[in-house]
Image: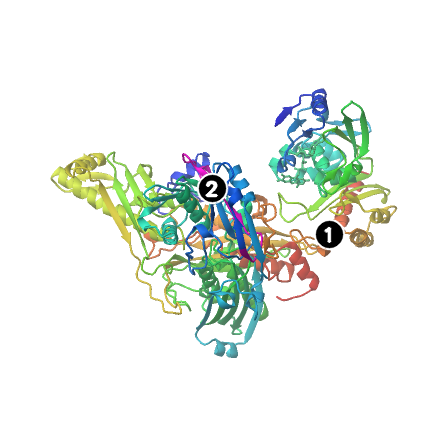
């Protein structure tokens, strides 16, 4: 087995290229270590090009190698992408948050990965670089290739950064999860929302829940209901019932019944939207 | 709050001002220096692995070992045909080291291999070919009891491993005369002790046939008995040496007998030491969880809340083999009857074989499982009668001087004060409207004598070494509960010497007195008493030898040897004097504590234990009615465990026990799919994390028990007993509905709420 800690992007690409598809990218190793490790690994967690959090004029750029702990501690993320901040704060346990990265969270492609759910709700784009140095951009939601399968081949492409629109005026986001224990537990349901209000009316809404499909899933009917609406008891009641009926979820013996998960989808969609609206109004 | 910052808490001294030593293991563990079973390495050691049945019930038609035998590195392949067909067991004899013609659960041991490394052993398992003929299987006790159900053991018709019918007083009359009768059914799944270290052992059989097993056990001498019997070896040829134990919680009283037997057999066959070690998954799938139970209980009360009678119908799920399940079923079915004054009792209990993982015991022996049911029902009754849950308990609780309905003689008991204090600590009289509150009480035998009526006590030796230090020998075991610290403190107290002058030998059966070990809350109570007597005996011997040496009377006072004129002698000088005079003997004090004989009749009415510990816990819980999610905010845990000689370790017991009780009540529980364990990893078998355990307010009400040494009583098990009842009642109070099936989860609360089923 060979394990190289790459000190820059060029070196990482070189090793990947020379291994003929045998080498794979590894970052925090919190997911990859649980599986049978490939024989060649390129550790990118020290590659400067994929680290750091920067706030541009109209974008927020978060390195794929940023750990959950770093993201949770970042004041920029808290003010510009609060849902992501909340999601990263609750991942696994302190050890997992100290090691695990946002890039790994997305590429590992677990259906209810917390950071990924927030990133999808925030409409984040991923920037990827292939072995010939050319890069492409894709929405995070489009990086899924099936249950627990990414469409990104980590022996041929490196996820570099996430690009997000910073919070606009009148915009707020939130993340919530419902898990059977306070740490180290997969969520029964997690949800994230990004909402913009203008003069007390909802002008934009993205509501995402998981696990339902391979990728974090937008609740399009619920979003439609929210658009143009004035927040109030009536609306929230409808959000709950629409959310729990517009999407199919599964039950399992180890987690919870289908019926209960469905109920939770409704409750969490409503709560996370309400929270995002409260924040949006504060930002108006 | 950090416990050392709590008001009035002093970790270094106990309430009588004696300094406290935490025992030798504590520092080794804290420094990462302790060696556990998993660390063991012996020269020439082989690695053993077990081939397990993939079927819940099947006939073994043929086993082909040729291919495995021929593999490089493989030193032995054993099947049932290589060993004697001799059944063994703890209560009933229903097990063989390897399945002979039938497998009875998924995981049943079919063959064992030993090889030069783990990889070769795994390859050997893959190369074994077993031909099975699947048989129909039965997974639920009700189905196993049904007419025509498949028979799991020929010698146990009807799949009944054990049963019991019991009547005290006149329950029929009591139910007839009652103003109120309440009843409900409760169910409790199997739980695993989930000790941190999966069981590991190295067995080493030498040429003359001496067998040494290196493994950490709570009761090594009892296991020696069983191993010697099963392997037909003389008892004196079986030695057990213990590394440090990575937790036990009752699960290591007998540990995993199969593992010890198979590694011993492999060592006998190969002449080399053989190491075997369970994986975490094996621990869950074939390690021995506690029995699952279904309880149907009925209570009769007078309108003023006086308890008149209780009737219980209990079915416990034994799994495929029995281990201690009959004893656990017995404790489960009767111990809670002695928490209160209940004059009339009827109990039917039945332990049933199913094609699932065999069961055994867990801390508190099922007492906590029944507590959930009994204490839930008391709250149901209180509500019907419009009585305060605290008051109804205060009115009925057992008190000092009582002989309980099953004949337990209560010589010391602060249960009433425990209840009052638990209520005070949780703020019972000033309850927050947004939360739910529950209270529960428990009793547990401390120094139970039923395991062996004839061998009730313990013995110990205390030796004055030539350097003036003292070495203690005891067969009792410490697995984190602080026994070694307690023994050191007890002996140091008698001899009035610095605890640092003491060394302890407990882990090698070759040199320690035979003991019953760490079960039934007997370590400090009974083992400690033996140490106390051994130390007193040593003191007498030291004084005699010193007097002889000085030619005048010498007394040992405050740890110093003084003659009449005030001159002082060194302990080492006396030790050497005696050693020389006898050409090699050492001053050795012996202590033997034999508790008063137990008298109990065939219905086991009688005083079954040296003494009894009591506890009352109160819980505060918040419930989110929309999802059923709940937060346990606080648990007040108040204990009567007699005198507390090591306040720090005692608190450790309470915190750990309550945390486990929280797990038992709200998180843990086996899940099966047609006999297959589904919850087989720590990700899926969820024990609470640090964030799930609430603030625990801990308090001791010290009584002085006439039987325990220095007035102490057991604590290790009773700490878990009242937790399920307190939490169930708090959740019911907060949610307005009652969950009768453990673990209490958000989903179950949500379902109960949405059914609107006000079963309270
Ligand atoms: C005990 C435990 C608890 C957990 N709890 C949670 C939880 O609560 N919520 C949650 O969402 N997750 C949880 N996880 C999952 C895990 O921690 C996260 O998914 C984490 O973010 C993965 O990141 P990593 O850097 O460790 O990935 P790695 O394990 O290093 O890699 C994962 C995958 O991503 C690929 N990869 C990583 N970085 C890149 C890159 N820059 N470019 C291309 N490919 C890349 C790897 O090749 C691999 O296929 C938990 C894991 C454990 C072990």
B24 is higher (above) or lower (below) than B110: above
Q: Is residue B44 magenta?
A: yes
Q: In this view, does A224 lie to the left or right of B305?
A: right
Residue B467 in the image: state x and y as whole percent.
25, 34
Residue B529 in the image: state x and y as whole percent.
31, 51
Q: What stretch is highlighted in magenta?
A: B36-60
What is the chain letter for disc 2? B
Q: What label sits on residue B595 in the rendered view?
A: none
* Quarter of the rendered image showing ligand 1: top right
Residue A233 in the image: state x and y as whole percent.
80, 53
Q: What label sits on residue A250 in the rendered view?
A: 1
What is the chain letter for disc 1? A
Residue B724 in which image quadrant: bottom right
Within 10 Å of disc 1 (Cα), the crowding (few <14, some 14-19, many 20+) is some
B215 is higher (above) or lower (below) than B132: above
On whether ligand 1 comes within 8 Å of the CB at mark 2, the answer is no
State which mark lies toward you, 2 or 1: 2
């Amino acid at each position: 087995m060979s394990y190289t800690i790459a000190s820059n992007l060029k070196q990482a690409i070189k090793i990947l290229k020379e291994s003929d598809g045998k080498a794979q990218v590894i970052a925090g190793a919190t997911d990859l270590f649980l599986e049978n490790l490939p024989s060649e690994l390129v550790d990118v967690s020290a590659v400067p090009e994929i680290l750091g959090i920067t706030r541009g004029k109209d974008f927020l750029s978060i390195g794929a190698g940023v750990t959950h702990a770093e993201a949770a501690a970042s004041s920029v993320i808290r003010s510009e992408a609060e849902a992501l901040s909340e999601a990263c704060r609750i991942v696994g346990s302190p050890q997992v948050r100290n090691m695990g990265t946002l890039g790994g969270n997305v590429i590992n492609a677990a259906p209810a990965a917390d950071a990924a759910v927030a990133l999808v709700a925030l409409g984040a784009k991923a920037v990827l670089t292939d072995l010939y140095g050319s890069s492409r951009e894709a929405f995070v939601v489009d990086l899924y290739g099936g249950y627990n399968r990414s469409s990104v081949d980590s022996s041929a492409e490196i996820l570099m950064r996430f690009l997000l629109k910073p919070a606009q005026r009148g915009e707020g986001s939130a993340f919530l999860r419902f898990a059977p224990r306070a740490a180290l537990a997969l969520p029964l349901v997690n949800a994230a929302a990004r909402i913009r209000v203008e003069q007390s009316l909802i002008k934009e809404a993205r509501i995402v829940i998981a696990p339902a499909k391979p990728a974090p899933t937008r609740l399009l009917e619920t979003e439609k209901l929210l658009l143009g609406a004035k927040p109030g008891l009536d609306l929230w009641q409808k959000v709950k019932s629409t959310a729990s009926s517009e999407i199919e979820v599964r039950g399992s013996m180890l987690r919870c019944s289908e019926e209960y998960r469905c109920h939770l989808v409704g409750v969490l969609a409503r709560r996370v939207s309400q929270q995002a609206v409260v924040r949006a109004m504060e930002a108006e | 709050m950090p416990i050392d910052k709590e008001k009035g808490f002093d970790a270094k001294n106990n309430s009588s001002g004696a300094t406290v030593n935490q025992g030798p293991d504590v520092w080794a563990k804290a420094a990462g220096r302790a060696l556990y079973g998993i660390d063991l390495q012996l020269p020439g050691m082989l690695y053993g692995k077990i081939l397990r049945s993939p079927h819940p019930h099947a006939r073994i038609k043929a086993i082909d070992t040729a291919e495995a035998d021929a593999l490089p590195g493989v030193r032995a392949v054993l099947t049932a045909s290589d060993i004697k067909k001799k059944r063994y067991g703890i209560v009933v004899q229903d097990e063989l080291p390897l399945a002979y013609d039938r497998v009875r659960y998924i995981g049943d041991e079919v063959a064992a291999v030993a090889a030069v490394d783990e990889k070769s052993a795994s390859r050997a398992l893959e190369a074994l070919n077993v031909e099975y003929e699947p048989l129909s299987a039965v997974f639920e006790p009700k189905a196993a009891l049904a007419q025509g159900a498949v028979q799991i053991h020929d010698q146990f018709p009807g799949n009944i491993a054990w049963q019991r019918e019991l009547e005290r007083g006149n329950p029929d009359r009591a139910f007839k005369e009652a103003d109120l009768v309440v009843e409900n059914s409760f169910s409790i799944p199997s739980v695993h002790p989930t000790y941190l270290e999966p069981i590991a052992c190295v067995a080493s059989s030498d040429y003359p046939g001496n067998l040494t097993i290196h493994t950490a056990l709570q009761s090594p001498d009892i296991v020696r008995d069983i191993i010697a019997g099963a392997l037909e070896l003389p008892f004196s040829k079986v030695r057990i040496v213990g590394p440090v134990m990575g937790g036990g919680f009752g699960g290591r009283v007998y540990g995993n007998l199969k593992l010890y037997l198979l590694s011993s057999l492999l060592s006998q066959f190969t002449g080399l030491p053989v190491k075997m070690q369970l994986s975490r998954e094996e621990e869950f799938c074939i390690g021995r969880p506690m029995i699952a139970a279904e309880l149907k209980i009925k209570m009769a009360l007078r309108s003023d809340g006086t308890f008149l009678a209780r009737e219980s119908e209990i079915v416990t799920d034994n799994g495929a083999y029995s281990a201690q399940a009959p004893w656990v079923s017995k404790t489960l079915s009767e111990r809670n009857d002695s928490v209160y004054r209940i004059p009339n009792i009827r109990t039917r209990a039945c332990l049933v074989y199913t094609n699932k993982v065999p069961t055994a015991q867990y801390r508190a022996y099922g007492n906590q499982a029944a507590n959930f049911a009994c204490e839930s029902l008391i709250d149901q009754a209180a509500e019907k009668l419009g009585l305060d849950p605290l008051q109804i308990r205060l009115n009925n609780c057992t008190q000092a001087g009582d002989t309980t309905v099953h004949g337990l003689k209560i010589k010391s008991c602060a249960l009433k004060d425990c209840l009052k204090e638990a209520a005070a600590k949780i703020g019972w009289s000033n309850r927050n409207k947004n939360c739910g509150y529950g209270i529960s009480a428990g009793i547990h035998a401390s120094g139970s004598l039923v395991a062996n009526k004839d061998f009730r006590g313990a013995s110990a030796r205390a030796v004055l070494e030539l350097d003036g230090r003292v070495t203690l020998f005891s067969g009792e075991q410490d697995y984190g509960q602080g026994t070694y610290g307690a023994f050191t403190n007890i002996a140091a107290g008698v001899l009035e010497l610095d605890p640092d002058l003491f060394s302890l030998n407990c882990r090698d059966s070759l040199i320690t007195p035979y003991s019953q070990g760490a079960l039934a809350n007997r370590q400090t109570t009974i083992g400690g008493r033996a140490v106390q007597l051994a130390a007193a005996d040593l003191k007498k011997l030291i004084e005699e030898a010193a007097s002889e040496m000085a030619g005048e009377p010498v007394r040992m006072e405050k740890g110093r040897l003084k003659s009449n004129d005030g001159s002082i002698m060194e302990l080492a000088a006396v030790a050497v004097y005696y050693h020389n005079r006898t050409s090699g003997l050492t001053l050795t004090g012996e202590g033997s504590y034999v508790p008063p004989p137990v008298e109990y009749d065939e219905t086991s009415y009688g005083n079954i234990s040296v003494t009894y510990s009591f506890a009352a816990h109160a819980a505060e819980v918040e419930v989110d009615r929309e999802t059923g999610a709940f937060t346990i905010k606080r648990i007040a845990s108040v204990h009567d465990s007699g005198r507390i000689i090591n306040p720090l370790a005692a608190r450790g017991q309470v915190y750990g026990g309550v945390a486990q009780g929280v797990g038992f009540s709200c998180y843990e529980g086996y899940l099966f799919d047609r006999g297959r364990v589904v919850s087989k990893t720590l990700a899926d078998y969820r024990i609470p994390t640090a964030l799930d355990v609430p603030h625990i307010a801990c308090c001791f009400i010290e009584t002085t028990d006439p039987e325990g040494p220095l007035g102490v009583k057991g604590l290790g098990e009773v700490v878990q007993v009242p937790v399920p009842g307190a939490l169930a009642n708090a959740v019911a109070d907060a949610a307005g509905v009652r969950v009768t099936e453990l673990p209490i989860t958000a989903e179950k609360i949500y379902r109960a709420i949405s059914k609107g089923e006000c079963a309270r």
